[in-house]
Image: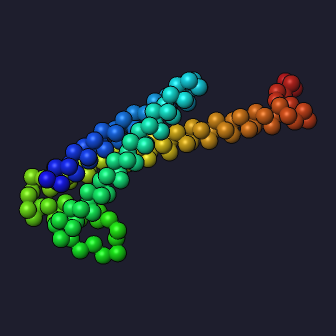
Amino acid sequence: MKINDLLSLLKSNRENLESLLRAIEEQKKSLIKNDNKLIEDAITKEEKLLNQISGQQSKILVLLKDLSEELHLNIEGNKYPKLNDIILAVEKNNSNEAKELSKIHSAMKEIVNKIDSAMKRNKILIDHSRNFIKETISALANPSHPILDRKV
């Protein structure tokens, strides 16, 4: 039955990861629009989802450890087994559960890669904004280098 619990947790985790990806995309749109209220809302939503995901990850790790003991897996040097180890062990007993675990695992990896990519794009937007602000302040603070060249 722990396999069903793991499947349920992984599905819930996948849904939260999908929501996180949407929140990160909202954050990008709000950065582009320069809408502080939307930025704050997106960040709040992101933080809430990250907390939920973190809690789920803890539960998943406990389940993985319990399942590894139940399936008599010998995990060398690792405190927690990897999901792939569980999938391989379950595959021997129940290929349907293994297929479902594998499907969810692949979907989660894909979503995490999309999240990573979206966060990198947001970082680029933020870095460009910071540089623009820094250069603008430098230009305004330095009267010897005027912003506009009045020679035409």
Relative image position of residue 9 (x, y in whole percent)? 26, 46
Q: Could you tell me which residue is drawn at 35 percent across and 41 percent down?
A: 17
Q: Could you tell me which residue is drawn at 51 percent across and 34 percent down?
A: 43
Q: Could you tell me which residue is drawn at 20 percent across and 49 percent down?
A: 5
Quick check: can you spot residue 124?
A: yes
Quick check: can you spot residue 24?
A: no
Figure label count: 0
Nearest the eye: 147 or 30? 30
In the displayed structure, would residue 25 be above or below residue 67? above
Residue 119 relative to residue 138: left or right: left
Relative image position of residue 83 (x, y in whole percent)? 26, 59
- Please tell me in which quadrant of the rendered image residue 52 appears: top left
Residue 72 relative to residue 57: left or right: left
Relative image position of residue 3 (x, y in whole percent)? 17, 54
Q: Could you tell me which residue is drawn at 26 percent across and 47 percent down?
A: 10
- Please tell me in which quadrant of the rendered image residue 128 appears: top right
Relative image position of residue 45 (x, y in whole percent)? 45, 33
